[in-house]
Amino acid sequence: MRARAVRGSIEAVTDRTPTEPGAFRAIQEPLHQALPAVVQPEWKERFPWLVQGTTRAASGFDLGLFSDASSPRDVLTRWDRLRAETGMSMVACAHQVHGGAVRWHGGAAPGLHLSDPCDGHATATAGTLLGVTIADCVPVSVVDPRRRAVALLHAGWRGTAAGILERGVAVLAERASSRPADLHVHLGPAICGRCYEVGPEVFEALGLTAPGRPTPLDLRAILAGRATDAGVPTEHITVSTHCTRCGDGFFSHRAGDRGRQVGFLGIRGA
Ligand SMILES: [Zn+2]
């Protein structure tokens, strides 16, 4: 058993106020076997048809398409390596705008596809890899093993306030007939609740009681609560123990890094 259960807010599951922090299991993500990346280990065992992970900053593996930290040629070469090592045909990503939109992807020509600006992607097509770029925000992976459909979301506080997690669940319901009770949610490497000090306006935007001064916020706990409110079973919600800010091996916007890691998710091709 690699997972360990933490957090004391289990009682909140049955009688909780919307937007409160939710319950989840913290989980250690081991390294990917071929890429500078970490993976959700339980999913690796249970869903062998799934491709999932978050890249690491190790060896300067910057995948930022819009952050100008690396040359475009180097960045595109790394994206191509990500696609090749995961065995996927096409990669779908977008310029991210901290909004709530989630785009559905079918099949497309091999290679990297940039769609119109958005912060979420979903698919039921094998061989289509979804990607979101991250450097403190949360890569949210949503998986429906019953329907074999997936959604990947880039969630900072603005996207969370805009309802991107709820939109991801809704798009899976609309396009793949997914039921929330079947969904599994993993919140990957992101800034932790000790490192993420934010102003009252962030608390207000998230529907939380605003403190009078800058206060730490655990955004992944908030997202876990929103997943619970959307109908995802608490036992299906896991959170990475990795912090991009105080841990090693990840790009952190708050730490001054200009590079970006990528959360990736897809259904393995035949
Ligand atoms: Zn931290």
Image (spheres, rainbow, N blue to C red):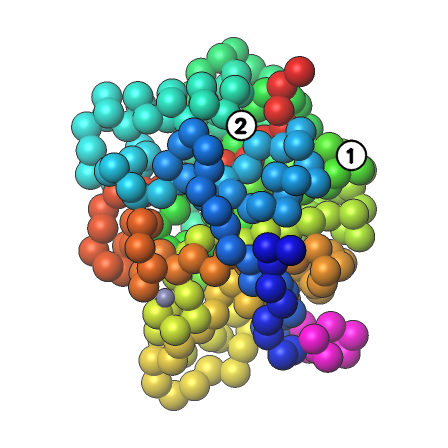
Q: Which quadrant of the structure image shows residue 15? A: bottom right
Whether residues under marks 2 and 1 lie with C-beta atoms below 8 angstroms apart, the answer is no
Q: Secondary structure at mark 2?
A: strand
- Placement of 157 over or under 55, stated as above or below: below
Position of residue 255 measured from the top left corner of the image (x, y, whole percent): 24, 59
The first of marks 2 and 1 along the sequence is: 2
Is 146 placed left or right of 185 in the picture? right
Report how far apart the C-alphas of labels 2 and 1 lie in the structure.
Answer: 17 Å
Is residue 197 in view from this perspective?
yes
The numbered dot on residue 232 is none
Inspect the image, locate mark 1, and give the three-letter code of the amino acid beneath it: Arg
Let me know if residue 123 appears in the view: no
| Disc 2: which residue | 129
| Residue found at x 27% / y 60% | 254
**Residue 261 point in image, percent of width and height:** 36, 42
Above/below status of 106 relative to 44: above
**Ligand 1 location (quadrant):** bottom left
Which percent across, then down, holds residue 8? 63, 79
In terms of depth relative to the viewer, which is nearer, 48 or 174?
A: 48
Left or right: where does residue 1 sit relative to residue 98?
Answer: right
Query: Is 14 one of the magenta-colored residues?
Result: yes
Q: Residues within 10 Å of mark 1 (few under 14, many from 20)?
A: some
Residue 215 falls left or right of residue 91: left
Image location (x, y in percent) of residue 263: 46, 41
The residue where tag 1 is placed is: 147
Identify the residue at horizontal 45%, vertical 19% (top origin): 84
- Residue 216 colored in magenta in the image: no
Chain part drawn in magenta: 10-19
